[in-house]
Image: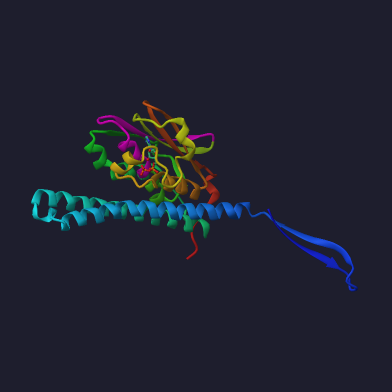
Amino acid sequence: LQAHGTRLRDSRGEKIGALIVLNDVTRLRRLENLRRDFVANVSHELKTPITAIKGAAETLEDGALDEPAGARRFVAMIAKQADRLHAIIDDLLSLSRIEQGSEREGIPLTSQALRPVLEAAIQDCALAAADKGLAIDLFCPSELHSRINAPLLEQAVVNLLTNAIKYSPERGTVAVDAALEEGRLLIRVQDRGCGIAAAHLPRLFERFYRVDRARSRNLGGTGLGLAIVKHIASAHDGEVLVQSTVGAGSTFTIVLPQEGKDSGDRQTSP
Ligand code: ADP
């Protein structure tokens, strides 16, 4: 609490009381701390690939250029780190776009069938799945409709699928299914991969939180995928949940409120 006080006096200057204004600044402080942590984290995340690029360029300058095999390796390293910077910046821009959209007039939602959105997400991940010999099963009744922002929901499912593929063993299976339960629409992405220890679950959706930093980086992760999923779920007035068992796999569930059919579409004003 922050307090400001003033003594109150009458016209002859006699003390007649005091006025104390109490401001609850805890929330403001917390927001300010979050912002500061975020800037520090972003800077750190950007610095890592930049340092690697600089190191590779210096090694090339110092003579590696004259040796074709070595030179190719360092050039490939520079390209990989540049891709990494690109991915981080893309994810940061996505996050800020979703945040801005939700804060202003809300993201536009229209009532539409869910199955094509899930099919598109699976299609987006088909190559990555094929590379690991993974099959992605889909179960979604075609009559399921919901008020959604299709491109954003597709992005959320792609992020969950990308993780499910990354953290699954070769030739495993990943399942996507959607169902109505107690008036809510559940979209589940389930893998039989390495799983996540319970201690990590509460922080999993924070920006840049990773269970295994080195592994995530090696797999091309930005540490922002799940934060984006969480933002997209909130922009739909929904949430995202996780259940996981180490060694057995993980299930991420996007839960969307299912309103009456006649609730109308939410459109942004022009
Ligand atoms: P990243 O880009 O590192 O994958 P995410 O925000 O998508 O970042 O995920 C955060 C962390 O959660 C990952 O680094 C990983 O440790 C863990 N994780 C996410 N999805 C899964 C999954 N399906 N199986 C195991 N671990 C996962």
Residue 7 picture quarter = bottom right
Residues drawn in magenta: 158-182
Give me the residue at 27% from left, 52% from top. 52
Find residue 250 and report its horizontal and vertical position in percent: 40, 32
Residue 246 picture quarter = top left
Find residue 48 and report its horizontal and vertical position in percent: 32, 51
Left or right: 237 with respect to 42? right
Q: Residue furthest top?
A: 248
Given residues 7 and 238, the one toward you in this image is 7
Give me the residue at 42% from left, 48% from top. 228
Find residue 263 and report its horizontal and vertical position in percent: 55, 49
Residue 159 lies in magenta, yes or no?
Answer: yes
Rendering colour mode: rainbow
Question: Where is ligand 1, by quadrant?
Answer: top left
Residue 162, visible in the rendered structure? no
Given residues 215 and 246, the one toward you in this image is 215
Find residue 202 and report its horizontal and vertical position in percent: 49, 37
